[in-house]
Amino acid sequence: MKIIFLDRDGVINRYPGRKKYVTKLREFHFLPGSLEAIKKLSQAKFNIFVISNQAGVNKGIFTKNKLQHITKNMLEKIRLGKGRIRSVLYCIHQEADNCSCRKPKLGLIEKALRILGNKKITKKNAFFVGDSILDMATGKNAGCSTMLVLSGKERQHNKRNWKVKPDYIVKDLLTASKIILNENFDYPCLSRSRTQTRC
């Protein structure tokens, strides 16, 4: 069982900015290469889940209906691009709510695993791809291999301040997919784990 957890903003679509949200459909823009990456991973029989904190709903910035509309459009474009998302799982709570589903807690990961019949995660069969150190902490907590993309929130010059170190640091989701699939390609990864011999 091969599993990939993807954060949404900054990984699949353009990062809206610090403390900002994608609040309507016209603000959702796929990042270059993200649809191709999802297609490649789908064709390789990965179970792909989107795992995203969307506290803007609970803050009253946008509604659940708006979020559902954005999600429906995203999934349709992914389907047209021959990709497949097994499920999109959101936490709409704020940090102060102390819910079990807000990353880096594992409520959404556990829900995804229930959808898969309570499959076990290992670093060999599961990856978490995100654009923040919060995502990397979630992946580490779940036992996944972690891949930080630099197409969203985080910047490599902040590396000294990271409380969690990702297994890989890469340009974007397309680059991450090529590493996961062991494809030969010219773009070097920006960081690699001790066990990786080739990007």
Image (cartoon, grey):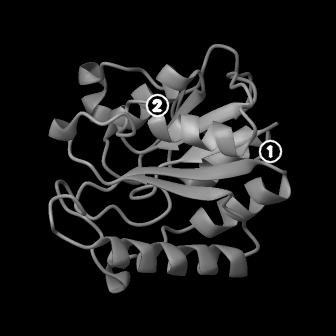
- Residue at point 78% right, 43% down? 181
Q: Name the amino acid, label 2.
A: Leu
Task: Tell me the SS state at disc 1.
Answer: loop
Q: Give coordinates of residue 13: x percent, y percent.
A: 44, 66
Q: Give coordinates of residue 144: x percent, y percent.
A: 60, 26
What residue is pinned by disc 1?
184
For residue 66, which numbered disc appears in the image? none
Which quarter of the figure has residue 131?
top left
Earlier-in-chain disc, 2 versus 1: 2
- Residue at point 31% right, 56% down? 54
Which quarter of the figure has residue 37?
bottom right
What residue is pinned by disc 2?
106
**Residue 152 located left or right of residue 83:** left
Q: Name the amino acid, label 1.
A: Asn
Q: Is residue 111 visible?
A: yes
Task: Tell me the SS state at disc 2.
Answer: loop
Estimate how packed mark 2 is, as few (under 14), some (14 to 19) or many (20 or more) residues with alpha carbons within 10 Å.
some
Q: Give coordinates of residue 189: x percent, y percent.
A: 58, 37
Name the foreground residue: 33 vs 133.
Answer: 133
In this view, the mark in front (2 or 1): 2
Q: Quadrant of the N terminus?
A: top right
